[in-house]
Image: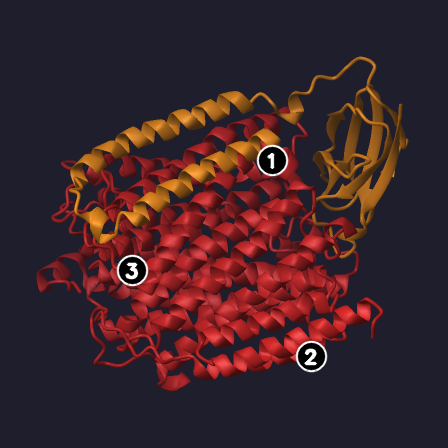
Amino acid sequence: MVVYNLIYLALLALGLAFFAMIFLSTRASARAKPMSVSAWKRRENGWMYVVMLALLAALAATIFETPWRAAAQPNRQIVDVTGQQFGFVFSTTTMHVGRQVEFHLRSRDVNHAFAVYDPNGVFVAQAQMMPDHPQELRVTFSKPGIYTVRCFEYCGVGHHLMQATFRVLP
Amino acid sequence: MTTVTAEEAGRLGADSVAVPVERVRGLVMRYVLASTAMFLVAGALGALLRQSQGQVHRLSAAVWYEVMTAHGLGAFVGWAAFALMGVTWWLLHELGFDLGVWGWRWAVACWWTMIVGVMGIVITCLGLGFGGSWVFLYPLPLKSASQWSELAAALFSASVLVVGLSIFAYCFGVLAVVTGPGLRARSENPWNRLGCALGLGILWPKRFATDRPVPYTVIPLTVIAIDMIIATVPLAVLLMEMIVQAADPSVTIDPLLAKTMLWWFGHPVVYLLLFPAVAVYYHLIPRYAQRPLVAGHALAIGWVIAVITNVLIGAHHMYTDFPNSYQQAVNSWMQPLTYAVTIPSALSLFSLGFTIYRSDFMWTPAARFLCVGMVSWLTAGLQGVGLATIQYDQVAHNTLWVVGHFHNMALLNIGLVIFAAVYAFLPALVGREWYSHRLANWHLALTVVGGYGSVVPWMLQGLNGAPRRWAVLPHRYLELTQIALPFVALIMIGQLVFVYNLVRTLDAGPVQAWLGVRREAPETWSGGRPEESAGETLGAVMAGLGVAVSVYAFWFKPFLWVPIGMLFGYVAIALGQRRQGLGTIGVSAVILLLTVLMHAGIL
């Protein structure tokens, strides 16, 4: 996340510098220099290749980091969680640091989402809970303490009340 | 204006007869005024939501979610999409594409269906208590935990369906006009003419031949007209299913399929706003730079990519749905396809930037709105690339970061383009210059400062995991929400300035303004500047409001509201009411001092 945000800020700074250059170039003193429209039309082709290469690089760097590619470990703990308006029902609320937890998520009524925060309130992971389509989310917790779960998909008038906690032991 | 010759009219049929310019002006004004009214209502609802989260006056959860639903759809389609639909007709007119009989009929049908649909949405939300959010994820509308009735869900679905009909009418109207006589295509084959309107003649000039170069402005309009027809059909089916299910609960649909159908529409509809806004950029930036758009083959390629990928990428809203290997594969494909749709944006910013570069640029109010809008397009577009990345979306999805992103795009890019179009085209529509350019510049400054002051706290909260669509946020996010509130007030003040300027400009009585529009109206902006003495009355009102806010603040959250009272005073000074503004700031300062002394226990 930090890397993403730093890349965003760096690109934003470059973009703002670009616009500053463009807007300042409309001053009378800058306009005195010749500007070839046809040359910049040709350079647009080059810009297109730069953009495509940058996107391809970003794709190659990130596409394999998806939650559904997290491999199941043999000693994982399976925890069933059911969402319903407006609460979560856990099969157990005790887990362990370092041992992979496989949450089996399902919904009894409407779309919900299962979002986990660590004891410091830092966001850990999320996945949807959909009626008729159970899905699995695998997480390995690194900190002991009380974790908070919040509903992350709007589910009705009690949506903001839909919270729960579980304990992760050392 | 380009008219259709008798020979062409005979060849293409009576449908291609030109519509008188007075009627086009009147119709476009109806769009502008109706969408502006919806903007003010939807914006006020948004401010109501934010102040409630800031715990100034907390709404009940049920009311908050009803207001959220009305705000979302009201602002998105009732204002932004509706305004850009109206702007589209005028753009096409200025480009020499006469509406013709069918274009006119579709444009009128589009206006009426949007009015009816949005009114239905507002009534079902605020009157019948429907609060299913603007994405109304199935089956929530029909499983409301007794908060609203099946009748409300059915009427809401029917209202959105009518809005969908408005979108269809817009698309058919645009396609009728851009493939009409104004295109000057040599072929009469409708598919070839459609290819010409898509800009394929730039890539294959012999195959897609036209008697004049196809304006770049037409290309994004054609792209979105094609894509929104494809995108809206599944949504219409889903809405009809919900109407039927409201009457007969035994009729159901798979929730995952329903979600796919929703997002199949739900992402392209974003481009129903962005692509016409791009058309406005393509049309106006060259005008103010006084040179043609700096664009070649690459931009045409970018739009070919857009017309294909735009309708395929809706499932990137479903990265956190991965119940089976099929959905996982679909999600994985969404990332490269979504990346691809950013290419026309990157190319457009390049073209627009170098159209301005070293030009004798006319820094009119409309031009300033456009230039700031381009910067926002960059800031929000880069955020979009992040959200398109599965790894990043796992953390940002459904947080307030997303809310910040789309307000950055919708208000501070697309919204500024809408205002730019209104500032640019109104003189030609009503036959008079704007009452004040200075007020227009104030409108821009207040909207941008308020807008970014409102958006950045959302993004920071989102990075800290703040959930979106929560009537009451967890307490740790309260401080940033309250910091944002003065900036929300700035946005509102900015829009008051805009409305005041608009009303003084029209100055013909609401009825005449609504009906449009003087027959002696000039064809284009005359370029003259009005007197710069405007704003005194508004300044006095601002000063009075500032005193009222500060006095009120003495009893309620003074550290939050007294600075807002001071801001009102500052705006009053800027609008020419120096004494009243200083008085407001003085009263506010005294109240702040008294409050500090009371908190310190001295009083």
- Residue that label 1 marks: B393
Residue for point 66% across, 24% down: A68
Q: CA distance from mark 1 to mark 2?
A: 45 Å
A140 left or right, relative to B80: right
- Subunit of mark 1? B
For chain B, what colour was chosen? red
Res A122 label: none
Q: Which of the two residues, A15 or A78, is positioned nearer the viewer here?
A: A15
Q: Quadrant of residue A92?
A: top right
Measured as percent of width and height from the top left, residue B302 is found at 33, 37
Between tags 3 and 2, which lies in front?
A: 2
Q: Earlier in the sequence, mark 1 or mark 3?
A: 3
Residue B363, numbered circle = 3
Q: The disc labelled 3 sits on which kind of residue?
A: Trp
Q: In the rendered image of this protein, does residue A49 appear above or below residue A85?
A: above
Report the front residue among B444 and B382.
B444
Q: Name the residue at 79% across, 37% down.
A: A120
Tell me the chain of label 3. B
- Percent coordinates x, y for residue B33 in the rendering: 42, 73
Q: Mark 2 is on which residue type?
A: Val
Secondary structure, mark 2, is helix
Percent x, y of residue B550: 66, 76
Residue at the extreme top: A74
The residue that mark 2 highlights is B551
Check the picture and name the quadrant holding the C terminus of chain B.
bottom right
Look at label 1 and name its amino acid. Answer: Asp
Q: CA distance from mark 3 to mark 2?
A: 40 Å
Q: Position of residue A12 (x, y in %)?
A: 46, 39
Q: Name the N-terminal-most of marks 1 and 2.
A: 1
Q: Of discs 1 and 3, which sits in the foreground?
A: 3
Whether residue B374 is visible, yes or no, is: yes
Q: Residue furthest front?
A: B602
